[in-house]
Image (cartoon, coloured by chain):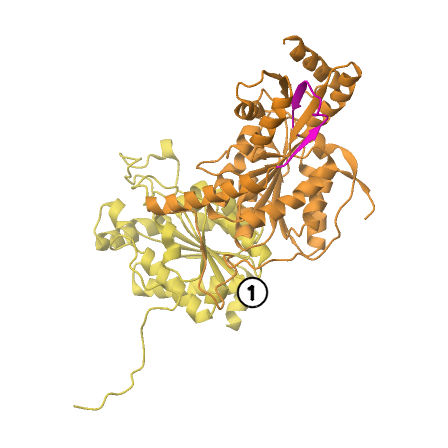
Amino acid sequence: MAKVLMKGNEAIAEAAIRAGCEAYFGYPITPQTEVLEYMSARMPALGRAFVQAESELGAVNMLYGAACTGARAMTTTSSPGFSLMQEGLSYIACSEVPAVVVNIMRGGPGLGNIQPAQGDYFQMTKGGGHGDYSPIVLAPSTVQETVDLVILAFDLADKYRQPVYVIADGMIGQMMEPVELPELKPPQRPERPWALTGAKGRPRNIITSLQLDPPTLEKVNLRLQETYKRIRENEQRHEEYMTDDADLLVVAYGTAARIVKTAIAKARRDGLKAGLFRPITVNPYPYDTLRKAAEKAKRLLVVELSAGQMLEDVRLAVMDKRPIHFFGKMGGVVPMPEDVVDAMKKALAEA
Amino acid sequence: MSEAKEEKIVFQRPKALCDVVTHYCPGCLHGVVHRVIAEVIDDLGIQEITVGIAPVGCSVLAYNYIATDFAEAAHGRALAMATGMKRVHPELVVFTYQGDGDLAAIGTNELIHAATRGENITTIFINNAIYGMTGGQMAPTTLPGQVTTSTPTGRDTKLAGFPIRVCELVSTLEGSAYIVRRSAYNPSEIRKLKAAIKTAFQVQMAGLGYSLVEVVSNCPTNWGMTPLESLKWLQENMLAYYPLGDYKVKDSVKELMAKK
């Protein structure tokens, strides 16, 4: 299929449609609102469900309801809205129903601003809501990759019956890039014997996250942990860029990783051997592959649009084996590649 | 001895009511309302196309008693969940079963917006003026002066505001089609309740909009009364603030009822 030039947010919407999303629920919040606008036209035209919810609480619980019927369903939001959704996401995880959530992150905390940021890493990758659950979190760094990962998110949600998040930011949501999309097909719904579709010719189904008996709730938790183990074993994804001869291994995801790639090209012109390790699944985090990649380098630099959240996972992966430096920008400030080159030089100078 | 004759069954457990012991306190009307819902489901023959949504509160385990597909919602979110289900499966009959704290405090936003969107969903709203499951705190529908564990000297409207009248509020919304208040304190009222729940389900199935049946109910345990005292208190105190009656019956609903 030919490539088309699309804005990130609109590409997310169209990717979901191509993935067979039967229901979309959302609430306006910058910088994600174009997803909602795009869906408001496309979904009804295709005979699929669209509701502009009364709040993100409403949206995530509509998502929960649609997911309970076995439909592929999605909501999208931005940081403050994602905070509101945490309650529903904990229920979705415990109920073991598939659901896709895209967070186009903005500057925080509080109302913050509407510029790109990566300050939601903790609340997205570490569960965020109450209880022991561990969502799959996919981190694209281009619009094409966002399309691919939104489609993958639906497949993984179905496969593991868990919520799957796509973590992007205002930069990816608002930029335009050429993308290739799969063909539009009618939604296919695989056999879902657990779904609430009316108890016709089968025993009735109950979907609940309530288990008053502690050993029973423990069993639910053990089953969830088993699912997360399978996810860790099968779904880790990452990209390495110019790492073979790198003295300095830069670790970054999403928009920060794009900037780092440009910075690496500049740094190498100055004779500085830098490479990029880019986690694509930030949960499950590719700890082992990062540990191995780090062994080839002399030191590491973590670059984020935050105060250093993924930094903790890098430390868990590398431990004390290599010095780890950090360069971060907060509040919606996006660093220039030159700023990152300076940070790289500083990290190596401290050696 | 005369020969055994086949007898006509005049009363039995509805098919849509599970044959189990409930966890409800003696004298609580939840069991009565559950049974009435199950009878309506049987009468309409919709057990195989109905999905219920249980609330957080005393009826959190309603899914163990009413024998249809069921989901358990987060506190107050039943109507958002129901919206998601119904929009994907308009052919299903989707109902929420919610108490006063769930519907009129933490879930007010979801209620108002599901109603104003005119979702084809039915809510059975149990108003007993108290938080039962957490042990008897003030509810949004607790009467002025009523003693609860969080209004120990009686609800002071200067401090805690006034009780919410849900039917009156929701009936102002254009998307609501059938909004009525009933009770279950005697057999006559129970029969009226059953007729209302049946109409509410039929309104949903005809796609006429949002339907809600409020049930003015009791809580012997947390009101600190015997079951009989509680029914007397309900009639003497609750009904003055929450008059029984029809608050919204759209013309389209009247036409539907005339046909049935």
Residue, x 68% and y 30% (percent of image)? A240
Residue A148 image position (x, y, % from top left) = 70, 42
Q: Is residue A174 above or below residue B44?
A: above
Colour assigned to chain B in the rendering is yellow
Q: Nearer the viewer, residue A133 or A62?
A: A133
Disc 1: which residue: B206
Q: Quadrant of the N terminus of chain B?
A: bottom left
Compared with B91, A37 (above or below) is above
- As helix, strand or loop, the secondary structure at mark 1 comes to loop
* Label 1 Cα crowd, 10 Å radius (few <14 / some 14-19 / many 20+): few
Front one among A132 and B141: A132
Which amino acid, mark 1?
Ala
Task: Write down the colour of chain A.
Answer: orange
Magenta residues (range): A237-253
Asked whether the viewer can see residue B57, the reply is no
Left or right of A143 in this view: B43: left
Residue A348 point in image, percent of width and height: 67, 12
Chain of the residue under label 1: B
Q: Residue furthest left?
A: B1
Seen from the viewer's position, the closer of residues A44 and B218 is A44
Does residue A246 belong to the magenta stretch? yes
Q: Residue B174, image x and y in percent?
A: 57, 52
Is residue A316 in sight in this rendering?
yes
Q: Nearer the viewer, residue B221 or B244?
A: B221
